Amino acid sequence: MPATPPDLTLYDPFTGMRFAQHCFLCGTPTPQASDSVLVFDQWLLSRYQLAGLQIKLLDQSVLAYKDLRMPCCPTCKHNHVEPLEHTVAAAVQAGPTALRTLDEKTLFLWLGKMFYGVMLLELLNELDPLAKPLYPLAENTQLLRKLQCFFEVFQALRIPIEYEDFTPASIFILETAAPEDTMPFEYDDDLSTMTFSIKLDETVLVSCLIDNGLLRQAMGRVYRDAQRPLHPIQVAEFKARVYYGAYLLNVVPDYYPRPVQPGDTHLVFDTLIDDVTREIFNPWENSGYAQSLQEMWKRWQIPVTEIMRDPQQPLSYLYDADGQPRTMETWAGIAGQPT
Ligand SMILES: [Zn+2]
């Protein structure tokens, strides 16, 4: 007996903004609160002892990691979300090399699931009539369009989708050096640029989820030079470059599913980026980049005046004054910074 052909019907939650009480992946109604999955899966909560910790949403409301859930029907949970989490959990358990060798699509879907989950909570919060968000996402049409594009490719979590000659995201994998690395887990995101970063033991994953790999291309040299154990302050600098680069990104990819033929077992997506009528990146400005650095270096409390001591060349721990990669075991404080 032939196997049942997979359902290749795409789902668009943005038409009608159906986010509450509908499976985030397929749209099936989920009237029960138990029809849901954790945004940060249980294995992450246990491994990094996150259950008692909280994250802050854009409207300043605070939620515990263990309460971050998104609606998910039992079928999607069992067939799609759980296997993905198992795959990544096993890789993390096996160590950095295993995590590094996971295929890019798996990483994209896994990072995308958490990113989308946080985004969904923001949106659901806003749809609550009592919430008064500072920057309502639901009214930000440009961001919604980006999110909609992201969701199209992200559906590969449920539907077999092949990306024809492109990867939807830039994913960077970094490794921290031991001596001054005290944080086994760290997470941050920038919803407006769809940038997301998570630290799992000594591995740091950083991703711009909607750039078709453009940022990774643009950062080719810096990324190659960063393929060695880095001091956390160097990792933070790398992240500042990614976050600022994502902010400069000026294009949103369009995705085109090819028409389905009878008997097809998967969808094929093509993509197009308009780099003819507009620049891919807005011009880099050191003053803007310095703000990103200051934010990422919060833990080290480096004032922007120090960062911008040379306005032509903001402070760097990844490179020395001659542009050569720096090796750093320990951070000697601002006084010990390169001149
Ligand atoms: Zn579902």
Image: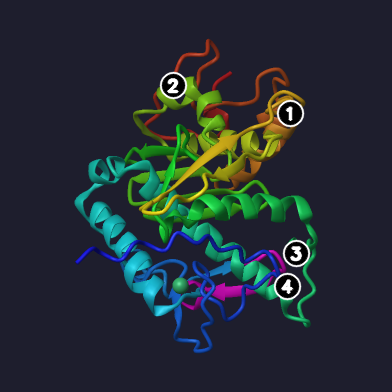
- As measured in the structure, the alpha-carbon distance from the residue carrying label 1 to the one carrying label 3 is 25 Å
Q: Nearer the viewer, residue 285 or 333?
A: 285
Q: Which residue is mark 1?
A: 282
Q: Quadrant of residue 310?
A: top right
Q: Which residue is mark 4?
A: 126
Q: Which residues are magenta?
A: 56-68
- Secondary structure type for disc 1: loop
Q: Nearer the viewer, residue 288 or 26?
A: 26
In the image, residue 269 sits, relative to residue 119, either above or below, namely: above
Q: Is residue 303 visible?
A: no
User: Which mark lies nearer to you, 2 or 3?
Assistant: 3
User: Which mark lies nearer to you, 1 or 2?
Assistant: 1
* Residue 164: numbered disc: none
Q: Which residue is mark 3?
A: 138
- Secondary structure type for disc 4: helix
Q: Is 335 within the magenta? A: no
